[in-house]
Each structure stands twice: as C-alpha cells, then as structure tokens.
Image: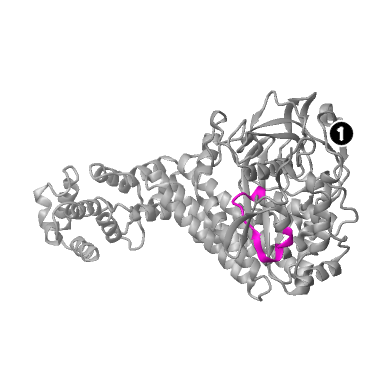
Amino acid sequence: MSKAFVDWLEKLKESQSWTAARATLRRSLAFAPGAYPPAFPYVEAFVREEGWQREAHYLVAALYALKDGAHQEGRTLARALKEAERARDSKSVERRFLALLDADRDQIAFRLRQAVGLVEGGLDFAQLLEDLLRWFDPRRRVQARWAREYYGVREEQTQEGIEEVKA
Amino acid sequence: MAKFSLLEQPWIPVLQESRVREVGLAEALLEAHTIARIETPSPLEEVALHRLLLAVLYRALPLVRGGCDALELLEQGGFDRNALQIYLCRFCDRFYLFHDTAPFLQIPDLPDKDPLPWAKLLPELASGNNPTLFDHTTEENVPLASYAQAARALLVHQAYAPGGLLKRLGVTSAKDAPLARPAAFLAVGENLFQTLVLNLVPQKDPGVPVWELPPLRTQDVQGHATRWPLQGAARVYAWPSRGVLLLDEGCGVRKVAYGPGVEPLEVGFRDPMVAYRLGDKGQVLPLRLSVEKSFWRDFSAMLPAAGGSFPATLAHAVRVAEEMGLRLELRVLGQVSDQAKVLDVRREVYPLPQGFLSPEAEELLQKALELAERVGNALYGVAREVAKGVLGDKDQEELRRFQDSLPLLPLYWAALDGRFPRFLEGLAQPDAMDRWRGEVRQAALRAWEETRAFVGTEGRHLKGLAVGERAMGLALTHAQAREGRP
C-alpha cells in the first residue's frame, strides 16, 4: 500500500503537473497534516482510514515534495541521519534523532520535517510511510529498529572485530 | 543433675522411610543404613551434624587407613554395632545437654550474669549485628527453643561462629570457628551409612575429641588460658570455639551464658571437608562461598591443574564410589560472611559423574568454566555499553549503578546455575562441550532479551539497547573465536 502510494508520487514527479504539485505539497507543511485542502487531490485517493493513518500519508507526501522527490529505495531515514552525523561530525544530529524517536503525535510532523531537512540525498519514502503507520504501536518496534539502524552493527565493523580476534 | 542425653533423646532430624523424624545420636549411627539422610532446612546444621557423627566414628571404629578399608566398611552394609555401643557407653555421661560438671560442648560454671538470647547461636536468626535474612525475631521476644533445637544451635555455633569482638572473661576478641569462612564439601551417598563412610577420610591421627578430655571449666578459657592446636578431624569436627552454657528453663532454652572458648593454634592442618586453592602470593587459602556467585564458578580454582586441591572428602569419596559403582552427589554448604556479619547461608547440590577425577574430565571442566566466564565478562562489557548509551558517560558512579541494575548478568548466571549440574552429569558424553556451548549462548541471548524488555523504549533507552546489541554480537563472536585457540 505504501509502495503503491510512493509509486504514484514517483509517476507524478515525471509528469508536467509536478511543479505545481510540489509547490502545493510543500506549502501543506505549514498546516497540520491533511488540513490543507489544495493538497487533497494528490493524497486523498490513497487514504483508507481517518486519523493518524490519513495524516501519515499527507506527511510523507509533503516530505517527498520537500526533498524534490528524491526517493531512494533501501535508504532509511535512520541510516541517512547516521551518514549526516558522520559528514557533519556533530552531536546535534544525534540529539535530533533521539528527540524524533520520542516524538508524540503533536511533535512528530515538526521533528520529521527537521530530520528530513538534515539529510543529503534520497530517502526510502515507502519505508518511511510504512514505519509511520506503525509509529504509535505500544511495543515501539519501529523506534527500536530505527535505533538499531542508527547505532547498530555495521558489516565492516563486525568483520573488523573478528579479524582482531583472529590476529 | 544430667538431662537430655544426646545419645538417646531425639534431636537429629533424619529422613527414614520417606518420613522425617528426629533420632538420638546412637540411633543415627546404629541405624545409619536404614536412614536416607540427615534432613534439615539449615545447611549449617547439616554440616555440623555430619561432623559430630564423623568425629564419633573416628574414635569408635578402627582407623580407616585407605580406600580398601573404606570399601570393606561399605561392604559390611552397616556400622559395627558392638564397637559403637562400647564406645558410646564409655562416654555416655559426656553427651548430656545439661549436666552439672560436663554439659556437652559447654562450660558448666560459666558466669550467667549477662546472658544472651539463644538466637545468638544461629546466624540465620536475627540478633546482634546479623542482618535479618529470613527471620524477624527480635532480641526482646526470643521464642523458647526446645532442647533438640538448642542442641543443634549449639553445634552450629561451635562450628560456625565468626571471629570478632567478645569482651568477656578477660578476652577481647575471639578467632573464627573452623568453618566460619570456608565452604564445606560433603559427598552424599545413597543412605546415611554410605555418606558417613564416604566422608570418613583416612587420617593419620584423628585427634582426641572434646568429650574424651576432662571437661573445660571457666578458668580454662578465661583470658584464653587454653590453646589447642587445630588438628585432627575428630578434634576439629567438635571444636569448642566459644564458651557456651545453655540455661535451662525447665521446658526449653531462652538464654545462654556466653564467653570465650579454646583458642585454636594454626598448625597447617587441612580440614578434610574444605577445598584449598593457591593464593596470588603462593599461600594456601580455603575456598569460600561468595554472595554474588554460585560455587560452581569456582570449581576450577580447586582443580589440581590450577594449583588447588580437592577437598579430601570429595577425592576420597569419588575414588571409593567408583570402585563400588555408587551414585554420588556433592553438597557444598556454608555461610557467606563479611567479617563478623553473616550475609547468607547456602547449600548447593551437584551430581558427581563417574570419571570425575580423570584428567580428561578436568580439562573439559576447565574449558567449560572458562567459556562461561569469558562470555560473562563480555556481557559485563555489554551492560556497560548499554549504560553508556542510555546515560552518556559523564557520571561514572551513576553509570555503574545503572549497569548493576540491569538484569543481564544476574539472568545469565542464574540460567547457567540451572544448567551446570546437567553438564556435570553428562561430562563423560562425547558432545558435552558442544551442548555446553549451546547452553552458554542461549543463556546469554535470553538474558539479553529480558534486558531489552527491562530497559524501556524512550529514545535514549533504544539507543542504549542498539549499542548494547552491537556489543552483544561482537561478544558472542569473540567468545567463540577465542575458544578454538590454545
């Protein structure tokens, strides 16, 4: 479902109406998600439920427009943020990331926009939407996975560890 | 006046025909082959009672000189009634709990002007500076102890009293009783008779027990007037560490007169029930129990390869049992103390497999213990990473407290505590080590899962967990990679 939505956005990006759509969706970021009527035509068809599910779609569409449709499959926001931290060599990215993990429904739109703003290059928006839809699960699995992606094992590091042991 | 004969009156709790009952000392020995075991909730009592029975046996039976004698004794299926009866008859008036001139293991003329509550005799009961472990009696409302209870408490106290301030009869401080610190090792057979024979370690000279000597009087202990070399199992197993006099109230004991006992002179005697290990400076140290870890983790310290030595009871029992094809169980019992404060009393039971004393088994054991410790150490590092992830590393003290609060290590060791006996039992099987490796890994992973659930789900917690998980992955690969190397 999330994939279909992002595919549609991708197609929109290829069309002539993208410039107008992008402007509208970016503009929608100044409102609460789903509260800016001019954005309705681009999103509403994909909304199956009211509430957070609807808001998440609007949010992702707006962020997609913010990044000018830089969709890159497999590059999650957590990983992109980690790369941003390394590139800037600053702790502020990590602080924002932790704040994002703890974001509740009032804060999440703002913090996501901030976080996405920090990222260079594309993001996996389908995954982002998928994750947002399950963001408020009490077990907080999504957040735990994000933390793992951010702080977790990197292939080369494990390999180093083993080499070290063998030496 | 003589009252409550320890030989005749029931006071030793035993399991006989699936029933727990109390018997006198004479019956315990004469009927030992029909008794399954001494059955008491208190580990200290269990040791003290066995030691008393053994001390009697050392003197009543012909001296056991080696494995052959023990085998012969076992084959008889019971103790020599005649020899026992003659011996017990000879000293029967020294085994009264209350006696005008020779109360058992007590001092008859001890001044009773500052009596102590009888609970003072047992570390499990709250009194003085003992922390309250399981018991909430206070010194004001000491319950009346039955004679049997008082007799057992007396025995426990003489074996386990920790040294420290005393300030009575010109003595300011007293030394440790023989078992105050070390753990005691008891090899347990299929019935009490077997158990006693298995622990009747050959002694060149078992020494003269206290009931064969003239009764001690107050003047003998005043100002430490009497010093005996701490030597000979029969002597040490019933050592008068403190001067005690139970004060009879007619139907029980509430108070005891108290004072110093015989001062022990260290002569390098090795208690047969105690394991020794080599200290950092080459000194020989008795193995102790510790509060935070189960005994098996120290198994390797007493392996001869590490310069330690098995307790004589264990070595003797395993040899004899293998000859006879007996099933053995090892019990490690004792108290954990910090100076004069008793923190815990413990009983740990392990199966003793056939072939336990072989070099192959020893090597395997050593390897298994090393693996468990190595993973344990790695998990310690993981816990630190988690703490650092959650709190940052500014305040070291807070970091350490948080780290200690994590269930990771306690759960890991608790899981292995449960698994180790099974590993020990299957020591001879070819895949023992593989299975142990699996157990260790499982224990670590399960402990990690629990820790995940414990930590919480705020961003900083998730960060700590993610960092910890990375460390965890490295730790397990490390431990395995290391294992293959010499």
Residue B307 lies, with reference to residue B108, above or below; the image says: below
Q: Residue farthest to the front?
A: B1
Q: Nearer the viewer, residue A87 or B214?
A: B214
Bounds of the magenta span? B29-45
Q: How many marks?
A: 1
Residue B132, given in percent of the width and then of the height, sits at 56, 37
- Residue B357, position in %: x, y? 76, 67
Vertical arrangement, residue A15 with respect to residue B89, above or below: below
The residue tagged 1 is: B226
Q: Is residue B476 visible?
A: no
Looking at the image, residue B414 sits to the left or right of residue A98; the answer is right
Quarter of the image for residue B70 reads: bottom right
Residue type (three-letter) at the residue carrying disc 1 = Thr
Q: Residue at x 54, y 50 (%)?
A: B410
Hey, which residue is sitting farthest right in the picture? B204
Is residue B168 visible to us here? yes
Q: Residue at x 90, y 56 (%)?
A: B204
Residue B165: x percent and y percent? 72, 28
The chain that hosts pointer 1 is B
Q: Residue at x 76, y 52 (%)?
A: B274
Using residue B368 as the reference point, say whether residue B307 is left or right of it.
Answer: right
Q: Nearer the viewer, residue B453 or A22?
A: B453
| Residue A49 drawn at (x, y percent) | 14, 58
Q: Residues within 10 Å of mark 1 (few under 14, many from 20)?
A: some
Q: Is residue B38 magenta?
A: yes
Image quarter hosting the C terminus of chain A: bottom right
Q: Give the SS element for disc 1.
A: loop
Magenta run includes residue B56: no
Query: B223 or B364: nearer the eye?
Result: B223
